């Protein structure tokens, strides 16, 4: 195992039908009628982390906490950090400040009830906190959120937040308040940026290239922030009838994820995001003018 850098291990706990920006996906009013499989991948992830002796950050949908509180309680019981992933898995640009605040409050209530713990971290669905959604950060701070991991520091399908940072950094809000940002950062090779540390990127990359990408971040003394979903450890999940490109991005490489998880746990050092931030020198702060 490499001990040079502590990387972040995070899981966005949502079910197979929680797909973004697809008008044929089940509506939230129909979610309770779908086959529920979130426990399958989550329990497999918990067991893999136990075998590796690793604690992680689980960003859980409030809806999942409402319908499967015992599963969320088990995540907390095994010593992992539990954060909010919103309640109904909605992209921030479609919510706006008022609806976002209501969705956040509902998620925090469900998660707190399930874990009996204060929830102080957040990740936006689809990493959808972009340059036009910084209004969300003061709302998060007002609800007691001290750590955010919603910024994907390159362009991507749901926006992204291109920013010249490679490590966790403080976001300075109005009145000098701050919120700690633990972003997902691409690997820069020359003048190109390559995302690699989660989702379809991780599923698509062969293990040798994935390992090389993590090693490259260690040479730069920067942590990689891994992000996975329970469905990625459930290759038998139902398949939705998606457009060809979306189908490829959503389902490519599912059969190889378990081996990649085992390889990463064996060869690199991981921790919850708060611990990564505590062990990593901060990058330059981001000052938001006019943030309340």
Image (spheres, rainbow, N blue to C red):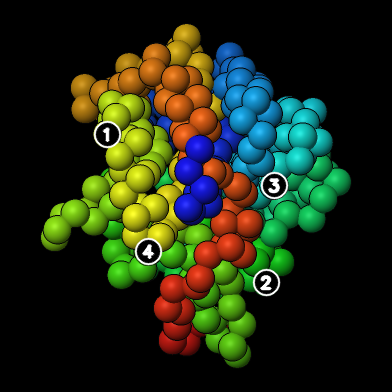
First of labels 1, 3 by sequence position: 3
Residue for badge 2? 142
Q: Tag 4: Cα neighbours inside 10 Å, few (<14), some, or many (≥20)? A: many
Where residue 129 sits in the image (x, y, percent)? 43, 59
Furthest residue in direction left, as rendered: 191
Judging from the image, what secondary structure is the residue with disc 1 in? helix
Report how far apart the C-alphas of labels 2 and 3 lie in the structure: 20 Å
Is residue 88 shown to the viewer in this render?
A: no
Numbered badge on residue 166: 4
Residue for badge 1? 209
Report how far apart the C-alphas of labels 4 and 2 lie in the structure: 26 Å
| Residue 137: quarter of image | bottom right
Judging from the image, what secondary structure is the residue with disc 3 in? strand
First of labels 4, 2 by sequence position: 2
Residue drawn at (42%, 78%), measured in percent from left and top?
Answer: 284
**Quick one: 69 or 90, which is closer to the camera?**
69
First of labels 2, 3 by sequence position: 3
Residue for badge 3? 81
Numbered badge on residue 121: none
Q: Is residue 155 above or below residue 76?
A: below
Report how far apart the C-alphas of labels 1 and 3 lie in the structure: 29 Å
Residue drawn at (54%, 43%), measured in percent from left and top?
Answer: 269
């Amino acid at each position: 195992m490499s001990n040079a850098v502590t990387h972040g291990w995070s899981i966005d706990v949502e079910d197979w039908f929680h797909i973004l920006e697809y008008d044929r996906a089940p509506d939230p009013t129909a979610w309770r009628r779908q086959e529920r499989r979130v426990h399958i991948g989550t329990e497999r992830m918990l067991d893999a982390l136990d075998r590796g002796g690793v604690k992680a950050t689980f960003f859980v949908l409030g809806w999942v906490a409402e319908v499967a509180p015992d599963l969320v309680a088990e995540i907390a019981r095994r010593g992992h950090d539990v954060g909010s992933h919103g309640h109904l898995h909605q992209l921030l640009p479609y919510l706006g400040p008022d609806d976002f605040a209501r969705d956040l409050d509902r998620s925090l209530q469900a998660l707190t009830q399930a874990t009996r713990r204060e929830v102080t971290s957040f990740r936006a669905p689809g990493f959808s906190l972009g340059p036009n959604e910084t209004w969300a950060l003061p709302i998060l701070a007002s609800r007691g959120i001290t750590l955010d991991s919603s910024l994907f520091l390159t362009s991507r399908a749901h926006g992204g937040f291109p920013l010249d940072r490679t490590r966790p950094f403080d976001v300075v809000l109005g009145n000098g308040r701050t919120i700690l940002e633990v972003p997902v950062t691409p690997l820069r090779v020359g003048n190109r940026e390559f995302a690699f540390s989660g989702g379809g990127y991780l599923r698509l990359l062969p293990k040798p290239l994935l390992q090389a990408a993590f090693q490259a971040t260690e040479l730069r003394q920067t942590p990689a922030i891994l992000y996975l979903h329970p469905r990625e450890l459930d290759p038998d999940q139902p398949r939705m009838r998606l457009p060809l490109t979306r189908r490829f991005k959503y389902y490519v490489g599912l059969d190889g994820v378990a081996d990649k998880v085992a390889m990463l746990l064996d060869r690199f050092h991981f921790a919850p995001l708060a611990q990564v931030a505590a062990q990593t020198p901060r990058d330059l702060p981001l000052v938001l003018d006019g943030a309340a």
